[in-house]
Image (cartoon, rainbow, N blue to C red):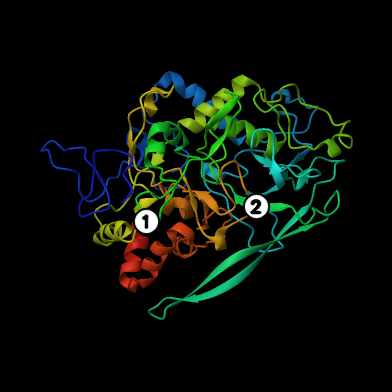
């Protein structure tokens, strides 16, 4: 088995137990509710993903409040009397961060062709690499398809999502059905994309817990990586190496579906530019190609930059200090049985249960926290069925970053749906497991071979996270 991220992680009758002794010196048992360490909140309502770290000093709550306002504010067209929040577009996907990440949570895909995308987008690229080794943007449409535009400007396209059902059967005869998206782009503003265009449908992930993931030492991520599968377990996770705009150098990717972004600050600035059409000093250009510039030269700007550094800093602080909801039902015998099965069938090889954050993050509350995100933040080959065939820096078209599982069971409560995976194709935790392939094929097969009671136990455990 691959090593866990913390050297003192103990295997017991449950999947994982961080060996943090109780007063009697015995390891914790029956699961650990403190998913985010001291940044854990006990909230099971629709507000569960939007709570800030309970350990923040009162003096810093003003930063949190401003960051929260920025996250939820609808940006408007320039010029406007609202000079601090104008400059929308001219091309965009949504008018606010919360437009995709409702209640700091997870987006969903359209249910069919008659529903417009509200919290998903389409990445675009063509063969080749940009100057930093990232995806080469489409020459006419850029790196992201914007399906909305300000008045007087034509949106790049209308996105229709059609679903194709794929029936399947468990070895015990139980039937199931999976679905995959068929993406159709209607009314393309600048003509056909071209046969060499690579498209990737991406649903907005949940925001909470990002600061803790950012605080995991790079050395720990590198230590658990096994790109050549030297231990022969069939798992070959590896780091993505991406361009860090602030450092002007390559760095370890952590955020995004393919770990294509190194920091939350860069993630926030990039999303403002690509999703809302708002520039900052960190990302001073929007996703407008040289072909489009001549068409949009008369569009008014909201300033240079439109998102100033003070606002970007506060937004970043807000996203860094969002707390993690506690795990629930830790003493439920069925969930504990599922926890054991999670380890037995190999899920914990990629969804690592525990890690300790480093001691050098700028925010003291994020340092030295024992957390349970159930991710290694590494790239894994997930097989042809999930492949988008679109490289992103080191990541190949078959590779995806292991997504964190904390808060998994609260998505229906916070966001009103249970859709999972990068494109929202999975309508439940069960469907998400059944889509696993590549390095996870063996674990998926072991899941399907469990009897119905054990499958239910494992899903009960996942829903408790």
Q: Position of residue 360 (x, y in %)?
A: 39, 23
Residue 152 position in % (x across, y down):
87, 41
Residue 113: image quadrant is bottom right
- Mark linked to residue 200: 2
From this viewpoint, which residue is outermost toward the left?
A: 24
Q: Is residue 153 visible?
A: yes
Q: Is residue 449 left or right of residue 162?
A: left
- Mark 1 Cα-neighbour bin, 10 Å: few <14, some 14–19, many ≥20: many
Residue occupied by mark 1 = 347
* Other residues around mark 2 within 10 Å, as few (<14) / some (14–19) / many (≥20): some
At x 24%, y 60%, the residue is 333
Q: Position of residue 12 (x, y in %)?
A: 20, 51
Please tell me which residue is depicted at 51% across the width and 44% down the height of the picture: 206
Q: CA distance from mark 2 to mark 1?
A: 25 Å
Residue 303, percent across and down?
75, 22
- Between 126 and 230, which is closer to the camera in this rendering? 230
Label 2 or label 1, whichever comes before in sequence order: 2
Residue 392: numbered disc: none
Is residue 201 shown left or right of residue 54? right
Disc 2 and disc 1 in contact, CB within 8 angstroms:
no
**On screen, residue 312 above or below 126:** above
């Amino acid at each position: 088995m691959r090593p866990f991220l913390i050297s003192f992680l103990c295997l017991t009758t449950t999947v994982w137990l961080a060996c943090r002794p109780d007063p009697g010196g015995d390891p914790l048992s029956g699961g650990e509710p403190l998913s985010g360490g001291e940044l854990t909140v006990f909230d099971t309502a629709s507000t569960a993903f939007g709570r800030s770290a309970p350990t923040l000093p009162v003096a810093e709550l003003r930063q949190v409040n401003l960051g929260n306002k920025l996250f939820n504010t609808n940006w408007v067209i320039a010029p406007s009397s609202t000079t601090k929040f104008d400059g929308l577009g001219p091309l965009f996907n949504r008018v606010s961060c919360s437009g995709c990440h409702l209640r700091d949570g997870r987006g969903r895909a359209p249910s069919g062709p008659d529903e417009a995308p509200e919290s998903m987008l389409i990445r675009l690229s063509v063969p080749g690499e940009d100057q930093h080794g990232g995806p080469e943007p489409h020459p006419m449409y850029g790196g992201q398809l914007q399906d909305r535009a300000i008045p007087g400007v034509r949106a790049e396209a209308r996105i229709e999502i059609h679903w194709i059902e794929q029936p399947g059967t468990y070895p015990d005869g139980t039937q199931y059905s999976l679905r995959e998206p068929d993406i159709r782009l209607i009314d393309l503003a600048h003509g056909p994309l071209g046969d060499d265009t690579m498209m990737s449908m991406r649903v907005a992930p949940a925001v909470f817990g990002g600061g803790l993931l950012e605080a995991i030492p790079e050395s720990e991520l590198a230590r658990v990586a096994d790109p050549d599968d030297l231990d022969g377990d069939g798992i070959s996770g590896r780091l993505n190496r991406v361009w860090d705009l602030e450092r002007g150098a390559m760095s370890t990717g952590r955020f995004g579906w393919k770990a294509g972004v190194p920091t939350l600050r860069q993630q926030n600035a990039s999303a403002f530019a690509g999703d809302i059409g708002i520039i900052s000093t960190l990302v001073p250009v929007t996703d407008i190609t040289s072909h489009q510039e001549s068409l949009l030269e008369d569009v008014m700007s909201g300033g240079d930059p439109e998102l100033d550094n003070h606002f970007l800093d506060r937004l970043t602080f807000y996203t860094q200090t969002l707390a993690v909801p506690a795990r629930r039902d830790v003493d439920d015998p069925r969930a504990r049985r599922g926890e054991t099965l999670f380890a037995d069938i190999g899920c914990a090889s990629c969804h690592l249960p525990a890690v300790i954050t480093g001691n050098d993050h700028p925010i003291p509350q994020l340092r030295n926290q024992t957390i349970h995100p159930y991710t290694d933040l590494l790239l894994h080959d997930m097989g042809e069925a999930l492949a988008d065939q679109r490289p992103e820096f080191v990541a190949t078209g078959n590779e995806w970053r292991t997504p964190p599982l904390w808060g998994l069971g609260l998505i229906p409560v916070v966001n009103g749906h249970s859709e999972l995976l990068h494109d929202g194709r999975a309508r439940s935790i069960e469907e998400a497991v059944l889509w696993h392939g590549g390095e996870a094929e063996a674990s998926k097969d072991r899941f399907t071979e469990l009897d119905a009671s054990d499958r239910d136990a494992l899903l009960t455990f996942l829903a408790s996270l």
